[in-house]
Image (tube, rainbow, N blue to C red):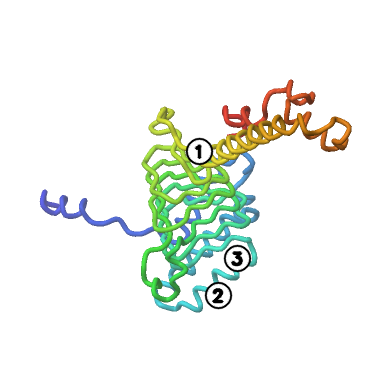
């Protein structure tokens, strides 16, 4: 073969893997990454995530052939059997693993790269675009996951956003914005706390803490006003005219209760506990 012919051969596109090749390499990946997996037979028979993904690969063939109803029937059968719903219109790369899997939802225009790993309860859903009904039918409305992305259990990634290569989304996070590569996202809404292995030191807003702090400040102002009113009326009120229940409340406002000696739980929360 001439030099020119060799160059042409090497530049030819690689054929897409067959269903059996997908199965083989996915089983190998599960055995490599899951310490609970003991044998290939166990993985093939007992892993619902594998069953759901392989059923998707069949349904996706019919979806691309515009046999939409048949494709949806296959995906719904897989959902009934596994508790995992993958729309046949989604685009999923190689070696995609769903661990445990129950409650996973992957929408129609979702795109997932190679070597991604997600856990149970994950939603790759549409954002506000889904509420537009048929007007958004042929638009991108679900997320795109790059290669090597890991999504923790119960996380939600909403809308046509991109979670870039090798990003990690912590369990329970809600991601509404693009995620840069090699980063870790935590919280509701999701915030990047690590990037390229380094913790981000920039000050991040904490909406919940700010709201609690605002309420605490307002209560302190109201307590001060109440004390002032109490002081103005003390000369006009005899001590025996105040009911015991009311006196207890006034004592609490004046800081005479035992709880005053303890550390303020709101201050503890604002200093970072529980956040």
Observer-nearest of 194 and 204: 204
Report how many numbered discs are placed on residues in the image: 3
Q: Cα distance, mark 3 to mark 1?
A: 37 Å
Q: Position of residue 141 (x, y in %)?
A: 41, 63
The correct choice, above or below, for 36 with respect to 50 in the image is above
What residue sits 79% from the left and 24% below the top? 258
The answer to which of marks 3 and 1 sits earlier in the sequence is 3
Q: Position of residue 246 (x, y in %)?
A: 82, 37
What residue sits 43% from the left and 60% below the top? 142
What residue sits 64% from the left and 65% below the top? 81
Question: Going by the image, does 160 lie left or right of 24?
Answer: left
Question: Going by the image, does 235 lie left or right of 131?
Answer: right
Residue holding disc 2: 73
The answer to which of marks 2 and 3 sits earlier in the sequence is 2
Q: Which mark is residue 206?
A: 1
Observer-nearest of 252 and 89: 252
Q: Which mark is residue 79?
A: 3
Q: Position of residue 202 (x, y in %)?
A: 40, 30
Observer-nearest of 179 and 102: 179
Question: Going by the image, does 88 lie left or right of 100?
Answer: left
Which structural element holds mark 3? helix
What residue sits 47% from the left and 49% below the top? 175
The correct choice, above or below, for 139 with respect to 215 in the image is below
- Mark 1 vs mark 2: in front: 1
Q: Position of residue 194 (x, y in %)?
A: 44, 33
Q: Cα distance, mark 2 to mark 3?
A: 10 Å
Residue density around tag 1, few if under 14, some if 14–19, many if 20 or more, within 10 Å: few
Which structural element holds mark 2? helix
Which structural element holds mark 1? loop
Do residues under tags 1 and 2 come within 8 Å of each other at their CB atoms? no
């Amino acid at each position: 073969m001439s030099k020119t012919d060799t160059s042409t051969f090497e530049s030819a596109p690689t054929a897409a893997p067959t269903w059996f090749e997908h199965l083989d390499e996915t089983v190998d990946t599960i055995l490599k990454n899951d310490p609970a997996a003991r044998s290939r037979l166990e993985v093939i028979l007992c892993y619902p995530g594998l069953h759901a993904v392989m059923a998707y690969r069949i349904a996706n063939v019919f979806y691309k052939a515009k046999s939409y109803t048949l494709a949806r029937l296959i995906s719904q059968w897989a959902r009934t059997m596994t508790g995992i719903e993958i729309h046949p219109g989604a685009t999923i790369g190689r070696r995609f693993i769903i661990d445990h899997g129950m409650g996973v939802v992957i929408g129609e225009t979702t795109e997932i790269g190679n070597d991604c790993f997600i856990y149970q309860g994950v939603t790759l859903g549409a954002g506000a675009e889904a509420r537009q009904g048929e007007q958004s039918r042929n638009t991108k409305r679900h997320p795109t996951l790059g290669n090597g992305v890991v999504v923790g259990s119960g996380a939600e990634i909403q809308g046509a956003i991109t979670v870039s290569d090798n990003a990690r989304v912590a369990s329970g996070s809600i991601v509404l914005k693009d995620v840069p590569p090699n980063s870790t996202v935590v919280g509701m809404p999701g915030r990047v706390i690590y990037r390229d292995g380094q913790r981000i030191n920039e000050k991040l807003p904490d909406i919940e803490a700010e709201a609690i702090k605002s309420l605490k400040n307002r209560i302190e102002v109201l307590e001060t006003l109440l004390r002032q009113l109490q002081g103005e009326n003390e000369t006009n009120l005899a001590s025996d005219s105040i009911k015991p229940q009311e006196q207890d409340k006034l004592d609490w406002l004046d800081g005479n209760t035992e709880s005053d000696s303890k550390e303020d739980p709101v201050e503890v929360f604002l200093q970072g506990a529980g956040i």
